[in-house]
Amino acid sequence: MTSEISRRNLIKLGVAGAVAVPVSARGQEEPQPVQPPHHQAADGQDVLFFFTDPEARFITAAVDRLIPADPVWPSASQAGVVTYIDHQLASGYGDGAKMYLKGPWVPDAPAQQGYQLRFTPAELYRRAIAEAREAVSATHGREFWELDAAPMDDVLTGLETGATALPSLPSPVFFETLLANTIEGWFADPAYGGNRDMVAWRMIGFPGAYAQYLELVERHGEAYHREPISISNSHARAVHLSGHGDGG
Amino acid sequence: MARRMQSVDVALVGGGMTASILGKHLAEAGSTVVALERGDMRDTIPDFQSPSMHDELKHSIRHALMQNPATQTLSFRNFPGQRALPMRQLGSFLPGEGVGGAMVHWNGQTWRFQPEWFELKSWVEQRYGADFLDEDVTIQDWGITYDELEPHYDFFEKVAGICGTAGNLRGEKRPGGNPFEGPRQNDYPNPPMKTSHSGALFGEAAAGLGYNPFPVPSANMTRHYTNPYGAQMKPCMYCGFCETYGCEHFAKTSPQTAILPFALANKNFELRTRANVLRIEWDRGSKTATGVTYVDASGVEIFQPAQMVVLCAFAHHNAVLMLNSGIGTPYDPATREGAVGRNYTYQTMSGVSVFYEGGKRINPFMGAGALGTAIDDFNNGSFDHGPLGFVGGAYIAAYQTGGRPIAYHPVPPGTPRWGREWKDAVAQNYNSTVSLSVHGSSIPHPNNYIGLDRTYTDAYGQPLGMLTYDFPYNDRLMSRHVTQKAWEIAEAMGGKSVAVSWLPDHYSIVPYQTTHNTGGTIVGTDPRTSVLNKYLQSWDLHNLWTVGASCFPQNGGYNPTGTVGALAYWAIDAMINRYMKNPGPLVST
């Protein structure tokens, strides 16, 4: 990454493809696996604003079954997904700021009519976690996070299919919300608390927020190896903004 | 008692594409014009700049540039008799909110409808016989012909700087273009986009099967371009952040980049933001609109008197405004009578994915909203429906729009939805999958319409619009036919496996499909079955006009923006050269 030089100016010189964004024509230089710095979170990054400690344990265990660790790439919680979900639930999303929240409510509406529960996302998590913990306790006599992987997966499958009934809401609605939020946190910009060190982007080869491929889009099949860049990369931001003196 | 503003010649409801076009030309013709936009001002600088613009969570998932359902939404049901329930979150479609409207966050895929689409009922009867279709296929003629609209398509393409290859230049077929398009008097103003890896793989397989691939006409610029207004646009960088994003590069056509500055430069034009129009006021005696009532940013109700009112809101909202104003006869699905709200149509979307071995390197993030290779061999006017029993069709395209990973992480069928196996499959397939879109037409059905909800209200206390919609049988037949063809092409693309996403049995408000909502205030030849005459003028109040996709009697198998733009210039021509010289109905009843 030639971060000292504005890529915009390089494009004017017609060398953007050659200099700013290295592409291997040989295609043999696969990126090396990168383990995230698990315990290098910045000050305050792991502070939870919404989840209580038991709730955080539940969600940590759950998201780590949805996206488990493997020999190369970390688990969801190792990548910060619990922090991500917590911060989302503590913000406008959790409060349903962009949801139509007026009644009357018809919670058993057909799926085609979409979400019809009375709960905001934050209320949904709080209630569903409490009720799921009770269901697990009644069946297994333990907390969800104390189970082995296989019974954990059985519980999650029960929530996904509705086989594990919760008293006050359809369990698949909670499961689908959790799965969607987990994938969001896994792939969203690291500025939101998940995808730490851009591990999810590295896993698939997505280069991130800063991007221009004018010179590369017709070089079909070439491997593209560039460090991903997040929106919080202050150096890239400064370089980018410096290119705007000429009006874009 | 509402505050009263100084009267203007023209009040435009909305601040998006059609309001920008009308504002520019009507102000230039000497009218005083005010455009009332419900959202905020926003512009390329500073609002659309990266890095914050390239934030998938904020823009694609949390809908930063779109309508907020907490303020205003629709209720929805699949069929009359079902209980309509509010759309509590955005999903199936994403109306814009704020200056520029949905044209800020569109992809830029800019098509024309085929000539016969404007005379569809007559065309079907003539070609296939009066008994060919079931009576529930309520297609109509527009009253406008392709030839009448062609000069306006042409001018809109120049304003928007569309990039493409002509396939039919004044009747002469041209290699590399779409041989099934209507005759065009001029080539596109700019050359086509580059060819993506996805597009090359699709194009090669399609050509091998005897089809006619061509580059999708694009509003993502391919070179520096100055439009007829003087707007200077810049080449697209293929950054992959078009749809649901504003363009930071001045490279995607929007009101801000191409049109609006030239309206704002005229002292006759005023853009008033945070002005949410509640209703059109009208005089029952003279049957004329007298202006509009809106609520301003601080919550004060204001009356804006106007000699003429033009509805330029997002498609379905034009019908809702007329219904909330008591103008015209609301459509009733029980009697099939009434015009306002009838013929709501949408888009019939399906798709096919081709999974390759991991070394394929599609690089899906090297994209642009309209970066695609398409075939039009299965759109309505391109093939014989005789043995098939339906009307309509679809284009098939391989788009490479960006590969943003929250929304795009394809896995082969049979992969679990979560867990280690899912994670491995995502890692293996992200960069080695090609997706084909089947972009189908949408035919009206008597059950599909826009009404008013009796239970739910918006933040202003007004009834929500109520959408009743399901996929008509005709469109399900059409989709099955063309999706089958897409599947055959996909099988010829050399992948290791193929997955088909068929049209679901029933329309759902939940998954994103397209923001191509059409109909509700349709044009036509008969005031009993249309809201507007062929000039887009209300049959009921001659000084009320509507410009937008809400005017389509049926939606073609194409993205609607090109036709919306052409209709805007068509209506302006009638307004300035005929109506304003002698106000009154341009078509007698």
Image (cartoon, coloured by chain):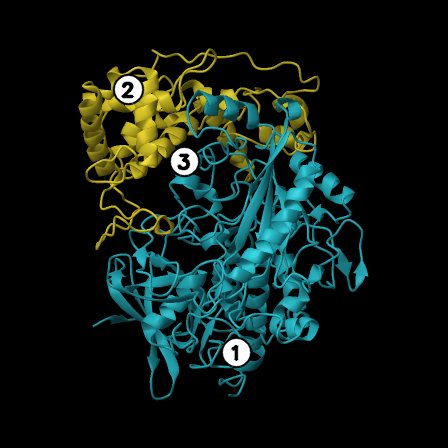
Chain colours: A yellow, B cyan
Position of residue B106 relative to residue A6, above or below, is: below
* B302 relative to B528 in the view: left or right: left
Distance from disc 3 to disc 2, alpha carbons, whole Å, reads: 20 Å
- Label at residue B533: 1
Assess disc 2: are there few (<14), some (14-19) or many (≥20) residues with their C-alpha within 10 Å of its C-alpha. Answer: some
Find numbered disc 2 in the image and state the secondary structure of the residue it sits on: loop
Position of residue B413 relative to residue B233, above or below, is: above
- Label at residue B505: none
Q: Quadrant of residue B463?
A: bottom left
Can marks 1 and 3 be said to lie on one chain? Answer: yes
- Label at residue A46: 2
- Report the residue at 74% width, 64% height from top: B183
Q: Amino acid at mark 3?
A: Leu
The answer to whether mark 1 and mark 2 are in CB contact below 8 A is: no
Position of residue B257 relative to residue B428, above or below, is: below
Q: What residue is pinned by disc 3? A: B57
Q: Amino acid at mark 1?
A: Asn
Q: Amino acid at mark 2?
A: Asp
Q: Quadrant of residue B557?
A: bottom right
For the question of whether residue B148 can be seen, the reply is no
Distance from disc 1 to disc 3, alpha carbons, whole Å, reads: 43 Å
Find numbered disc 1 in the image and state the secondary structure of the residue it sits on: loop
Quarter of the image with the N terminus of chain B is bottom left
The answer to whether mark 1 and mark 3 are in CB contact below 8 A is: no
Front one among B462 and B544: B462
